Each structure stands twice: as C-alpha cells, then as structure tokens.
Image: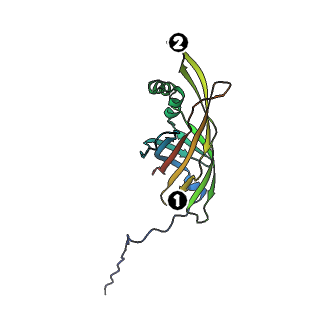
Amino acid sequence: MGCTLGFASCDNDDTAAPPTIVSTQSMYGDYTGVMTSLTIVPYEEESTDTPEGTAITATVDNDTIYLTDFPIKDIVLSIVGDETTADQIVEAVGQVDYKIGYTPTLSAAKDSILFTLDPKPLKLSVNIPGTEEGESLPTAIEIKVQAAEGANYEGKTTALKFGFQASEVLIGEDQTPLEGFTPTTFDFTTVKSRK
C-alpha cells in the first residue's frame, strides 16, 4: 500500500498585498533620495522647467531627521551673488550636517505617518571676500527655516517626504537681515534604504 502526499502553492500576482500596518517606529532608519530647491523670483516670467534635484541622504530616529552633507550652495550664492565665490566658500565650509526635530502622528488607517517639523535656524561661519584684494572677513550667517505642511511617511512604499523654506538670512553678530534675499523652498523625496 502506498501513499502520495503533495503540496501546491499558488502565487497570484494579480492580488494586491494587504496594506502595511505601521507604527511611528516604522519610519526610523536610513533614507536616500533627492532634494529639489526652488527660488521664486518676483517679476520674472514663469518657468516651466522642473528644478534639478540633488542627491541627499537622511537618517530618522524617534524625534529627529538628520540630513548629511546638506547642500548650501544656493543659499551662499544668494548672499555673495557670484558663482565662483560661492563655490569657493562652499568648499571652505566643508560638509554641513543639519538636523530637524519632528513630532509624528499615526494616520487613522495605520498605513502612514504624518509629522510636523520643528526646524531650528541653520548657522554657518564663513569667510566672505572683502573689498581689498586677498581680504577675507569671517562672517556668522544664520538662516531662518520654516516648515512646510504635508510631511509624511507612507508605510507601503517607505517613502518619506517633507519640505521647508529658508525664509530669511541674517548676517553678522548683529544679525542684519540680508537685503534682497529671496526665500528658497527645499523639498525632499526619499525612500528607506534596504539593508
């Protein structure tokens, strides 16, 4: 007498996977993605160009987003007004890391997390060329930062999206507002790195 036993497995690719249930801890981890910056210049013709993105990495823990090697060139360029000088200053300053606090709220469907950013000013110390040949003036720069609405983490795709605006630049120890500074919006679209 013999017995045959078999198992069959059926993988139906047409069926969507059940929604991922997330907790606020789900967004902890390392991310890679793109940061786009957009400066609205008044009285110029509207451009249909999509701004180029800059590669960015971020790490998220329980209450802070850490941005590694934050690209500051657009901000420095708005201060000095010359691309070559801006490149030299960015190189002299070196890597700038920026961290942003946040408060998470789990969505009612438990499939995403909305979070409110609590950015602090970005502070830099740079040497700005003086009026005399070879002169360099050490200058404190403080960039005021305002959070944009709609920051979120999507559980199914592990996409983390947020943004903020550099709204004002203050120069020197007396924190004189930079005349003519045009606010710049920074949008971040990142995905959790697979390990």
In the rendered view, would you say 160 is above or below 35? below
Kind of residue at disc 2: Glu
The x, y position of residue 70, in whole percent, is 52, 37
Which quarter shows the N terminus? Answer: bottom left
Of callouts 1 and 2, the N-terminal one: 2
Q: Nearer the viewer, residue 167 or 73?
A: 167
* Residue topped by disc 1: 155
* Residue topped by disc 2: 132
Q: Nearer the viewer, residue 21 or 43?
A: 43
Q: Nearer the viewer, residue 149 or 183?
A: 183
In the rendered view, would you say 20 is above or below 149? below
How packed mark 1 is, by other alpha carbons closer than 10 Å (few <14, some 14-19, many 20 or more), is some
Q: Residue furthest top?
A: 133
Query: What is the secondary structure assignment of the residue under circle 1?
Result: loop
Q: On the rendered structure, is 53 left or right of 119?
A: left
Kind of residue at disc 1: Gly
Residue at 32% from the left image edge and 82% from the top image edge: 4
The x, y position of residue 115, in whole percent, is 61, 53
